[in-house]
Image (tube, helix red, strand yellow):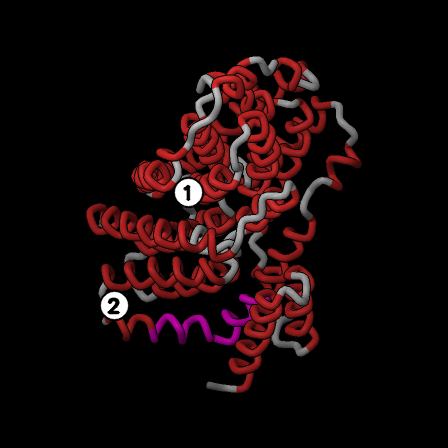
Amino acid sequence: MNVPQIFSIAVFLVVIIAIMSEKVHRSVAAIAGAMVLLLSKMLTVDSAIGYIDFNTIGVLIGMMLFVAVVKNSGIFEYIAIRSAKICKGNPWRIMIMFAVITALLSGFLDNVTTVLLIGPMTLAITHILGIDPVPFMITEILASNIGGTATLIGDPPNIMIGSAANLSFMDFMANTGVAVVFVMIATMVCMYFIYGRKMHVAQEAMHAVMELDEQKAIKDRALMTKSIVLIVLIALGFVFHAQFGIESCTIALTGAAIMLLVGKQDAEEIILGVEWSTILFFTGLFVVVGGLVETGVIKMLGNALMSLTGGHPVLTMMIILWLSAIFSAILDNIPFVATLIPLILAMQKDGMDVTALWWALSLGACLGGNGTLIGASANVVLSGISAKDGHPITFMGYLKIAFPLMILSIIISSVFLLIRY
């Protein structure tokens, strides 16, 4: 191992340790790491820009802008109240319905946006029912990460994988989407035995839910109509973008541009609503991982993995699935995926069929986020909403329920991949 390789590994590890410690903001850590590589002349500005995946960045900015406009219509609060009334105020049915809504929304919005919208509505419904919101919150955390696994745009790792491997929205639906259906069913069955059987509320509380007026949740009916039309058009755009030869970021940014034009909201407020710290984090991280590619570290790791598995595709697939799941439960899954993408691309250059490896990485990284309370951003956000309301979700309390369910989801994914590939 030469000096540039050791230096690029050191920069990468320092960035990851800084992110894990939470003493330095993850965006600051990533940008600082990128600047060290530029100042040391390990990368030039042109080569650093070449490692930034602008398709991933574009999808994230586009969807964040779009959601920032749409949420002002009150559509998400309307859906929550309507769902609770369809369930006749029955707490177990509401839990299932909210979990399904969370999973479906997470397939088309980023997980953090989804839980920011569903969390407050869950608290409102559980307060009326006079029931502990923690089981609902835990179920929604699990559902958000499961639902996000299903589509190209559901979770940042999938956006990164889709962009690197040139995979379409329908490719994800036909692979991770199918696996996720089985994972979701198994998770809901387990949640019934953990929580569902114990859920009982007074008839008066159920009647109170039935008396809620979902029409009052609508803040802007015209904006809501425009939102529904554009959500359908954007979804169709993502489904058929490969056939039209259009990048997924073009679909997201076009949808955002149209929504900004027809939504007639305060543009400054909407633009400030984008999580720019997340965008900076991605940008810096792509450059830091680019340092590992530039110095040949990724190729070296690829050769080591190939020699360990003897180039056996099934064994390599299983190692990537389980490693990414365990690591993603402990670390942020984005740096891990950013590191493995060039590794898989290096294997592809050496003549290996890596199709199954992309799906193993996606399922492992996204579902692995359910393992601990810090495994994914949505987990941290929703537990924070719950704690602020006086119902904290403890790290160990969550771990006891979620980690075994995460392992179960990876076992189901293993069976799916073995049958499929």
Q: Is residue 296 magenta?
A: yes
Image vertical order of residue 344 relative to residue 236, above or below? below
How packed mark 1 is, by other alpha carbons closer than 10 Å (few <14, some 14-19, many 20 or more), is: many
Can residue 13 be seen here? The reply is yes
Q: Is residue 406 left or right of residue 284?
A: left
Confirm whether the magenta stretch covers residue 37: no
Q: Quadrant of residue 184?
A: top left
Cα distance, mark 2 to mark 1? Answer: 30 Å
| Residue at (28% x, 63% y) in the render | 316
Q: Is residue 115 left or right of residue 187?
A: right
In percent of width and height, residue 323 lies at: 37, 63
User: Badge 1 is on which residue?
Assistant: 146
**Amino acid type of the residue that numbered disc 1 sits on in the rendered structure:** Ile
Looking at the image, residue 241 lies above or below residue 310: above
Of discs 2 and 1, which sits in the foreground? 1
Secondary element at image label 2? loop
**Is label 1 in a helix, a strand or a loop?**
helix
Identity of the residue drawn at 66% across and 36% down: 65
- Picture coordinates of residue 270 (x, y %)? 73, 35
- Principal secondary structure, stretch drawn in magenta: helix
Amino acid of disc 2: Gly
Of the pair 323 and 196, the residue shown nearer to us:
196
Q: Residue at x 65, y 19 (%)?
A: 217
Question: At which x and y percent is residue 193?
Answer: 32, 39
Q: Earlier in the sequence, mark 2 or mark 1?
A: 1
Q: Which residues are magenta?
A: 288-304
Q: Residues within 10 Å of mark 2 (few under 14, many from 20)?
A: some
Residue at 41% in and 65% down = 343
Q: Which residue is mark 2?
A: 311
The image quarter containing residue 3 is bottom right
